[in-house]
Amino acid sequence: MLPAFKLLEPNTIEEACRIALDTDGMFLAGATDIFVAMHGGALFPETLISLAKIDALRDIRKTDQGIFIGALTPHRYFEFNQVMKTRYTAIHEGCAQVGSPQIRNRGTIGGNLCNGAPSADSAGPLLVFDAVCVIVGAAYERTLPLREFYLGPKKTALRKGELLKSIYLPEPVSRSASRYIKFTRRNAMDLALLGVSAYLALDDSGGIADARLALTTAGPTPIRAGEAERRLIGHKPCDSLFSEAAAIAENESLPRTSWRSSKEFRLKLVKSLTEKALREAFERI
Amino acid sequence: MDYIVKTRPAKIDPLFPEINIDPGDVFDFPDDSVELPAIIGKSLPRKDGQEKVTGRTKFGADHNIPGQLYAAVLHSTEAHAVIRKIDTSEAKKIKGVRAVLTGEDCKVRFGHMLVDQPVLAQEKVRYWGEPVAAVAADTLHLAKLAVRKIKVDYEPLPVVETVEDALRADTLVHENWSDYQLLGGCAPVPGTNIVDEFVLVHGDVEKGFREADVVVENELFCSMIQHAPLETHAAIAIADHDNCHIISPAQSPFMIRKIIANAFGYRLDRVRVTCTDIGGAFGCKVEARLEPLCVALARRTKRPVKLVFERHEEFAAALARAGVKFRIKTGATKEGKLTAQQIYIYWDTGAYATFGPRVNYNAGFASNGPYYIPNSFVDGFCLVSNKSLGTAYRGFGITEVAFAHETQMDALANKLGIDPLEFRLKNALRNGQESVAGEVMQDVGISECLEKAAEAVGWYDGPLQWRTAEGKLRGKGIACFIKLTGTPSTTSVMLRMNEDGTVTLLSGSREMGQGVETVLPQLASSVLGIDVERIIMSPVDTAFTPYDKTTTSSRSTFHGGLAVMDAARDMVRQLKALMARHWDCPVEEITYDKGVIRCLFDPEASVDINTSFFTRYLKEEPPIIAVGRYGTKDIFSPPDPDTHQSDRPTIMWMMGAQAAEVEVDPDTGRTKIIRIGAAHDVGRAINPDNCRQQIQGAVLMGVGNALLEEMIYVNGVLVNANMVDYKIPTSMDADFETMVDLVECPHNTGPYGVKGIGEPGMAPTAPAIANAISRACGHQFKSIPVKAEHVLFRE
Amino acid sequence: MDWRDVTVYVNGDEYTKTIPVQMTLAEFLRDELFLTGTKIGCNEGECGACTVILDGVAVNSCLVLAVHADGKNVLTIEGVSEGELHPLQQAFLDAGAVQCGFCTPGMIMTAKALLDRDPAPSREVIRKEIEGNLCRCTGYNRIIDAVEKAALMLQKR
């Protein structure tokens, strides 16, 4: 049973932002994280601001350069959508492994990011597609690369009264592919002990034109492994290169020891799974 | 050939001279061609299925009583602490709150063996999650709100978190065992954390080790795990100082009745336990859990009180399987004959005794495995700690001891360079051999189980360890077990013929998924010849259901079945007498065959009880109501308390074997199950598909045990108390085939030769998987679950 | 407490109730409508026992506020069959996919949402679709058998 709260249900983004400015209310999207915390006694919000009635947050709009995806889009969209499966494969793979079908039907991409969890399955894949956050306040809109969105564990760049409106995904170039590998103890309904996202684009000669690597649960926030990416760009893809890059990624990651697993174990996983993700992304091109 | 029932000379009950109360009708199987009744060996769909697929089945939380209050519990946030002060004033101020109880208001303790467990913590808390206060209110919302307003001031004490802490005994979980009423079945040792010790001595282990060419010694560990049925605990109580009525998904209602009567001072018959359907139990609903809390609140408020545990409460304050540590030493000759085994067992049974000592006892008897070992010494300690309460868990310690002896068997086989299957077969118990308990064994089917399980995973088709083309490590492992059923025990049933000729079976055996509601009617039908569709089981209620000790220990088909068949024979006698009166002939001239009653010398006198019998003959006749009983006191030979040697420690031994093929990813340490072969000696499969269902389901539970499940305590706090962090297997973890072989080596007493199969399916799974992983990795793993990091950091 | 009026269409019947906003759909079904076929196993979306179909989509009813079902259609286990069993229910019986039965209603609802969307799913798809419905008794494979069987039965109709 959930503790009592006051429920506000604004119809527009502006109204939602204004309420958030004026109250201590928390935004409620798919509820798949907040209710768990409330139910477990970890969270007792006085006011919840439900976004359910704001249809604008569900808009999906294609442009010449990319695609805007409303923050309330459920994970299920990324799981089933053909464009996601073929062009943004890692995002599809990440979202298809969030919780369960029931969770993916309700849980939203915006919620997954704003929750700020370092293990978010959508975060790493979105990072390697250079996703941009479209953030709105009561009377303004700003954009922020997803790379700058995470400030710390459970801490994002959203300011009071701000709302994540949509995610912008630039169109990937033609000779590119991606891969998301999630390491869990159980094969479903589990949180990532480590998530590795890889994106590779090749130039005409078969060399690596662009490489992007993201790690989740390998530090206080989802991170890009910039050094490892730089090691890859401009070189011919091969197993030894992937192995070298993976070793660099291992150095770049900052996992900690908790009861869930040890730092040493996570570091080993960073190495072996980065190698694997790169290899498999490359095989997909 | 007709199926033969040999009856021992009956003992005559003076009150009911016509009823045979002999405990052991002996079924004799002259050869394999024996014709069994058609209903035996028939895979009928479960009788409770229709209600379950339509959502009509009512489990614990689905029941409500008009006028009920809703209860909520405040759980301890400390593992071990003195309660300095509890402030309930804010909680009591809330309108609609009808009672707030603390240990001050309710000094009641309860227990099955030792009356050590307070309904609400008294003066100190002994585990994280222990109930400290309870509220009853008009709504659940108010009850939960009130709980949040209660303030408790704790003074932390050192936490006993491991068996080493417990053995050291510089901190005592219970200061003075003699404060508690001792009901039997355990013997706490003053000034220690030992609630019971079990010693088994057979032969001379020192001599046995001297005779051995190789000796292996290991320290092994099994984690504490939870039953995690999908249904959490729930209860409703209606109680005053004279009468008490409980409605709950109780696994053993007569035990709950006794515990409650003893705790609150009721006369036994004034306590009524009405059973709801059970949404999974596996041992955790054998204990009184929410019942005492509800009774305490109901007595205070004079209103019905309902309490349902939330899942996180279930993790914190329900029950668990004790963690356990073994020190085990085994010797064998170079020919591969076992000579001696010595086992020290340390159960981390948690804060209160519950059924922990019984786990120690059952597991102690089973800890040498189904092997002929001339010399054995077992010393098992049941130790209390500041953790969740370890109790019965699908086998009473059998998986754990199997993990220990099966690790040893592999270690010895490896050392001697003998195939692990061959090694086991060399030492497997045979009929006529003496077990480590000193019993001459009969009806032993373990060798066949081992061979069949191995065959199912292609044991001899290729190596036992290899590397795949993708670089993955493959391995095969095998394990077996032996398990007793609780003895002595007793059961009784009634068969009531209704006015339309249908039959209602009253039995205390609880349906909890294992299929007893289908199998017992099959057994009744096998004697009566009445269509099994026309026999149903009544709901269970101690107010009218005949006594049955418990639904545990894989005993129901065996014990309940014998009682049902006894009752059915009684019913046949009554039907024959009825028709003798009707046809006016001596009862000796009446025959009864598959439901057709005939008079030998009158071809006209014939009636089939499945057809129009009842309107024609039964109307206004004295009702047909039959009683059946079965008990094992007479066959039980009480084990010597110092050595646990006994001619007959149990009525029925269960044995089985499983083999596993696994694939280990050397880069991540992850294990994937490829296939499992399971061969269990069921004695006789009354409902073969139901037996397979039991085994297949149990195997996946065993996979969880082998790879995933553990209750993780950090400074006495259970940190993974939810269904994501405590990982029971999902459908995605079940993507492997389980090939089941039902071996039928009939028991000489069980109905048609039945042995138990509810618990055995899980027993060898984790040991077989652990052995397979060990073989794949070329490294003996010494604890379960075997996790990825164990594999990666194995050297 | 914050109260609202809601009208929810459950198994084709209209129900209007005044309820507190924190009431979940699972509680609404069980405590207000006495439809106890929807089970609560964890109340945190981790077990799937409370699965119902909300406007055609399988959801954990413990994670949906009842007020968010206002004006919507809800299908529960009680509404799956009228008179004779639905092929899924029959197939669960035939395949031996039921033991204690606590997960069964949620499992059937998840499977129904799947078959409504994809009438001929592969075993892999079925396995993945029921990943959020925990079962402690059966080992799942018979449940997958049952969903396959039901799909065939439905295709023959």
Image: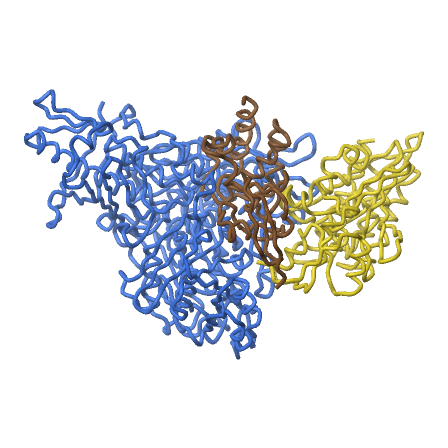
Chain colours: A yellow, B blue, C brown
Q: In this view, does A142 lie to the left or right of B605?
A: right
As drawn, A137 above or below B757: below
State the residue in front, A275 or A212.
Answer: A212
State the residue in front, B473 or B272.
Answer: B272
Q: In this view, does A245 lie to the left or right of B89?
A: right
Residue B771, visible in the rendered structure = no
Question: What count of labels does the image hold?
Answer: 0
Residue B326, visible in the rendered structure = yes
As drawn, A227 above or below B383: above
Can you say which quadrant of the picture contains the N terminus of chain B?
top left
Q: Report x, y in % for residue B552.
A: 37, 49
Q: Report x, y in % for residue B113.
A: 35, 62
As drawn, B106 above or below B622: below
State the residue in front, B29 or C72.
Answer: C72
Q: Report x, y in % for residue B340.
A: 41, 48
Q: Is residue C81 left or right of residue B565?
A: right
Q: Report x, y in % for residue C8.
A: 59, 46
* Residue situated furthest top in the rendering: B603
